[in-house]
Image (cartoon, rainbow, N blue to C red):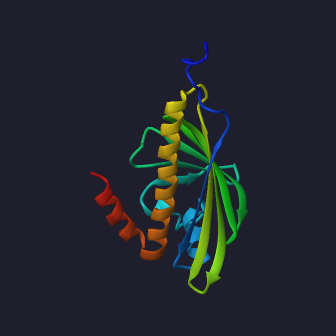
Amino acid sequence: MLGLFKRKTAPEGPVHFDLAVEFACQVEEVYALVNWNSPTNSKRLLGHEVMPVVGMKGRYRMILKSLPDHMFELQETRVEPGEHYQYVCEILPPFGALLRTTESYHFESLGEDRCMVTQRTEATFTTGMSYKDFQQEVMVMASACQSALEKLRIQAEHGTDALRAVENKLVL
């Protein structure tokens, strides 16, 4: 009975988000959009600053135009061109309760101009949150993962200008 009104805390450990979306384009086009080393990386094409860290293979830094006070530290952890791309992202300073993500993309060709992209995001949040706050963070992250993959599909299939037009309508 004494524990009845005790504050329920969030579970510890990362939370996984798994999504799969079919794209009406070739694997190579989508792979280039997620590859931080590619000149046609999605974020670069959108005008965000993505720069390699000199002397550190597979390490990049990104500054988003909408979050100029935050540095995104990106480290490739698995690179298999046209098949798999994975990296760890740490946000400095942390943004809300999100500490880091591991984002993994698996690519499967479905024919000449179609592919399936499966995205797995592992999000690590701060510890000690209330369960209610944790639930809110998980909902926000789930929505962000879905939105990011859908934006990637729009950019791959219709181009960067089409994605900008969609983003301009979404931002009030």
Of residues 5 and 142, which is closer to you in this image?
5
What residue sits 55% from the left and 53% below the top?
51
**Residue 5, image quadrant:** top right
The percent position of residue 171, horizontal first and vertical second, equals 31, 53
Kindly tell me whether residue 57 is visible in this rendering. yes
Kindly tell me whether residue 93 is visible in this rendering. no
Instruction: Answer with left or right where residue 168 lies relative to residue 39.
Output: left
- Quarter that holds the N terminus: top right
Which residue is most to the left? 172
Instruction: Answer with left or right where residue 142 lies relative to residue 111.
Output: left
Q: Is residue 123 above or below residue 109?
A: above
What residue sits 60% from the left and 63% below the top?
35
What residue sits 63% from the left and 81% below the top?
110
Of residues 119 and 11, which is closer to you in this image?
11
The percent position of residue 7, horizontal first and vertical second, equals 55, 21
The percent position of residue 57, horizontal first and vertical second, equals 70, 53
What residue sits 61% from the left and 60% below the top?
119
Which residue is most to the front? 1
Q: Is residue 120 above or below residue 71?
A: below
Q: Is residue 90 above or below residue 161?
A: above
Instruction: Answer with left or right where residue 24 lies relative to residue 3.
Output: left
Q: Is residue 101 above or below residue 79?
A: above
Which residue is most to the bottom? 112
